[in-house]
Amino acid sequence: MSTRRPGLVTDGGAPVTLTGTPVAVGDPAPAFACIVQEHGSWAMREVGLDDAAGRVRLYSVVPSLDTPVCSRQTQRFDAEVASLGDAVSAYAVSVDTPYAAGRFCRGTEIANLTALSDYRPERSFGHAWGVLVEETGELCRAVFAVDRDGRVVYAEITPEIDDQPDYAAALAAVRAVV
């Protein structure tokens, strides 16, 4: 059920409205369809929840990879999930175009996260996971972890879009189900 949640999050101190279906720990992870630019080419493909079925998944959600806070978050999770090896499929989700996300990853040498673009008008991930900011069309800052059975084991939406997430808590939740 899609809902509007005004004032749950602020952007620069100003309240904004989140839209979409709220996701909580214990819920089945919702399906979505994002776009990824294939590494080293101009080709793009659609990626969804089932692409990593049976694996632990980490979704690091940011408004735009090309901003300082989002860049730090993406680089931090990229470095942290390196120690988990192939046990985890990790993603950075934004509304950046697939080409912009690919350029960011190449420029910052992101090696352990796949950049997913939710740039299409339907904002599939944003609506399905309840993290779409109504006022801007961007995604708020959030982190989700999903276990091998497809259940959400960690869900965090930062109260202020410019705040960093709780890296330790998110990574502990991932490690607990690896």
Image (spheres, rainbow, N blue to C red):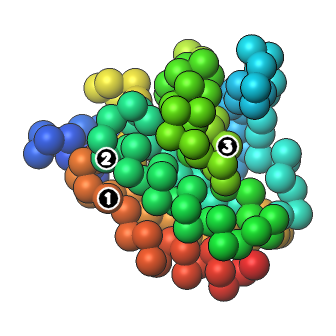
Q: Which mark is residue 114?
A: 3
Image height of 106 relative to 85, above or below: above
Tell me, yes or no, if residue 141 can be seen here.
Answer: yes
Q: Which mark is residue 26?
A: none
Q: Quadrant of the C terminus?
A: bottom right
Q: Earlier in the sequence, mark 3 or mark 2?
A: 2
Q: Position of residue 147 (x, y in %)?
A: 74, 70
C-alpha gap between disc 2 and disc 1 = 7 Å
- Amino acid type of the residue that numbered disc 3 sits on in the rendered structure: Thr
Q: Quadrant of residue 166?
A: bottom left
Point 37% across, 62% down: residue? 165
Q: Residues within 10 Å of mark 1 (few under 14, many from 20)?
A: some
Helix, strand or loop under label 2 = helix
Q: Position of residue 148 (x, y in %)?
A: 81, 69
Callout 1–callout 3 Cβ contact below 8 Å:
no
- Amino acid type of the residue that numbered disc 2 sits on in the rendered structure: Val
In this rendered view, identify the residue nearer to me: 143 or 88.
Answer: 88
Q: Is residue 155 left or right of residue 133?
A: right
Callout 2–callout 1 Cβ contact below 8 Å:
yes
In this rendered view, identify the residue nearer to me: 39 or 136.
Answer: 39
> Mark 2 highlights which residue?
69
Q: Earlier in the sequence, mark 1 or mark 3?
A: 3
C-alpha gap between disc 3 and disc 2 = 18 Å
- Amino acid type of the residue that numbered disc 1 sits on in the rendered structure: Gln
Q: Position of residue 160 (x, y in %)?
A: 23, 52
> Mark 1 highlights which residue?
164
Q: Residues within 10 Å of mark 3 (few under 14, many from 20)?
A: many
Image height of 16 relative to 78, above or below: above
Q: Position of residue 99 (x, y in %)?
A: 60, 18
